Amino acid sequence: MREERWNELADIKDELAARDWFPGTSGNLSIKVSDSPLTFLVTASGKDKRKRTEEDFLLVDENGKPAEETTLKPSAETLLHTEIYKKTEAGCSLHVHTLDNNLISDLYGEKGAITFRGQELIKAFNIWKEDGEMTLPIVPNYADIPTLAQAVGNAITEGTKGVLIRNHGITVWGRNGFEAKKHLEAFEFLCSFHVRQLMLKR
């Protein structure tokens, strides 16, 4: 099970790295290994995510602490992932920093959310209404990680599939790696479309 999850997360990391979604070693990924007790693999801190190594991930517990002896440090934002696993049925959580999702978070940060409507990619969230909509909450970029994790957790309601952190990045999740990546791709498309739409209207 663990090796299977490791390879699944490594494949996702490779795909996202190829899109240049991890500038400056930013971003972090995780995938659940067990429910009871909660354990999950999370990216090790400070690694070049464009490279695939045996030290890319480590196993952590429900408190985001290493679940076994290791010299690796979990990502500084591991608590965001623990909050998501506690608040949702997620099996995988992905956090990336891109130009467009940062622009959206800054443009709509004061409103606390952006709602996308009428776009085909909304169907990626299993919303099949003709005029379907998806709301993406935006929380402040607290420097204190426990405070940030709590803000992300508080923003999660029924139907939430992702949260933007203002001028920081987006965190999304899904029941498995495939679904989490699908949600991330859809949100990135929606953010990019909206940014370009605003530019054309100027």
Image (cartoon, grey):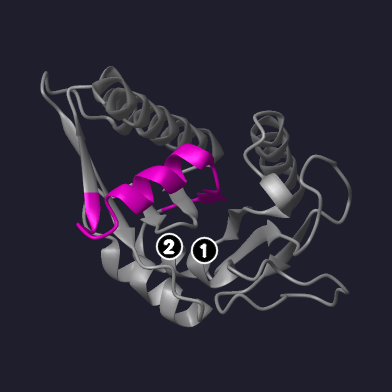
Q: Is residue 109 visible?
A: yes
Magenta-tinted stretch = 90-113
Please state the horizontal and vertical placement of residue 197, each as a whole percent of the image.
29, 24
Mark 1 neighbour class, 10 Å CA radius: few under 14, some 14 to 19, many 20 or more: many
Q: Residue furthest front?
A: 202
Residue 185 painted magenta: no
Residue 131, above or below 158: above
Q: Which residue shows up at 66% across the image and 45% down it? A: 22
| CA–CA distance in space, label 1 to label 2 | 5 Å
Of 63 and 192, nearer the camera is 192
Evaluate if marks 1 and 2 touch, with contact meaning CB atoms under 8 Å apart.
Answer: yes
Mark 2 neighbour class, 10 Å CA radius: few under 14, some 14 to 19, many 20 or more: many
Q: Which residue shows up at 85% across the image and 41% down it? A: 51
Q: Which residue is mark 1?
A: 81
Please state the horizontal and vertical placement of residue 156, each as a whole percent of the image.
28, 61
Q: Which residue is mark 2?
A: 84
Q: Which residue shows up at 72% across the image and 51% down it? A: 24
Say which amino acid is labelled 1. His
Q: Is residue 180 visible?
A: no
Q: Is residue 84 left or right of residue 47?
A: left
Residue 14, above or below 139: above
**Residue 76 quadrant:** bottom right
Of 112 and 118, nearer the camera is 112
**Residue 57 quadrant:** bottom right
